[in-house]
Amino acid sequence: MPNSFLAVSLHKQKNNVGLSTTATTTIKHTVISDFKEITKMRLSLSVVFSSVAGYFLGAETISLKIVLLLALGGYFMVGASNAFNQIIEKDLDALMHRTKHRPVPSGRMTVNTAFLIACLFTVLGITILYTINAQTAMFGAISIFLYTSVYTPLKTKTPLSVFVGAIPGAIPFMLGWVAATDNFGIEPGTLFALQFFWQFPHFWAIGWFLFDDYKRGGFFMLPTGKQDKGTAIQVLLYTIWTILVSIVPVFGVTGRLKLSIVAAVVVFGLGIMMLTYAIKLYKNRTEKAAKQLMLSSVLYITLIQIVYVIDKFIR
């Protein structure tokens, strides 16, 4: 009998340890997942990629230390903007299927915790970027301010919010060049223009296939406010502008930012790929076509940044 009792007790203790371990693992998983979501890790990493690409384009000699500082500071900068954004929009996020499970609207993270993360990331991001140079930190601070204090409030008031949001969204590519040179001129200006124009077809495509969900939250993302021909035409026009800006460096008018003829042909070809999907959206005006355009735009901006960098080092 005592042996049986001991066996049962040990079995219960083992089960309790197992449950405790599982609970701890679940909590850790939830905390990590919430951290990824409050900072929008995938978006933040794409911004870091753009910044590093810009640095490689501007640097005469590559400094691993600067690359690491730029990547870390850039991540904190975007993470702070996203955290502030989710605090401000928590009630609206709760209304949309796409965002209602985010940490703050779902109640898994308090507003105070999110605010602490946002503030900490702001200080860390700007401080780290300042150790590179003052201009890099300044543009990082401008990016956080515009995204949080101007773009986010305008999203429920006017489609022009996309124009405002395109400014901080275009800063990362040029930020890398400024980090490398401590100078803002025609070269980073061109990189800014390229990513600025690219954001319109990209975000309008998102606004198109998520139209109903954005409507639940009261967001105005499409230029005409509708999934109509007028919006599709503007998507086409801004896609064309993006393609034109992307090949300007081949003409030798953008200072040290240059592009070989071969690279320009590749970049132009990638632009035509994106334009094909923009035309498809114009013809079909479906959510499927909009999603295809969005995916092609992500592929486009990633590949042309890679082409720009490779071309610099093999030219």
Image (tube, rainbow, N blue to C red):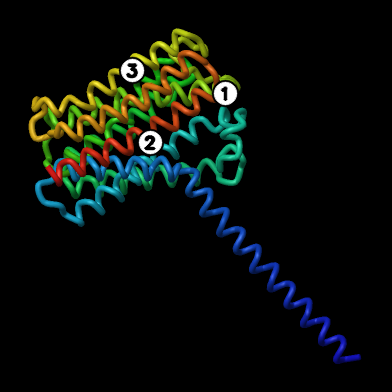
* Residue 13 rendering spot, x and y as whole percentages: 74, 77
The CA distance from mark 2 to mark 1 is 28 Å
Do the residues under discs 2 and 3 have CB atoms within 8 angstroms?
no
Question: Which mark is nearer the camera, 3 or 1?
Answer: 3
* Residue 61 rendering spot, x and y as whole percentages: 11, 51
Say which quarter of the image contains residue 179: top left
Q: Amino acid at mark 2?
A: Leu
* Residue 236 rendering spot, x and y as whole percentages: 37, 15
Q: Number of labelled discs?
A: 3
**Viewer-side residue, 53 vs 278:** 278
Q: Secondary structure at mark 2?
A: helix
The CA distance from mark 2 to mark 3 is 17 Å
Residue 305 against residue 1 in the figure, above or below? above
Q: Which class describes the residues within 10 Å of circle 3: few (<14), some (14-19), or many (20+)?
A: many
In this view of the protein, can residue 158 be seen by the observer? Answer: no
Question: Which mark is nearer the camera, 2 or 3?
Answer: 2
Q: Quadrant of the C terminus?
A: top left
**Viewer-side residue, 261 vs 78:** 261
Q: Earlier in the sequence, mark 3 or mark 1?
A: 1
Do the residues under discs 2 and 1 have CB atoms within 8 angstroms?
no
Q: Which residue is mark 1?
A: 217
Residue at the (51%, 54%) spot, across then down: 32
Q: Which residue is mark 3?
A: 238
Residue at the (49%, 12%) spot, across then down: 225
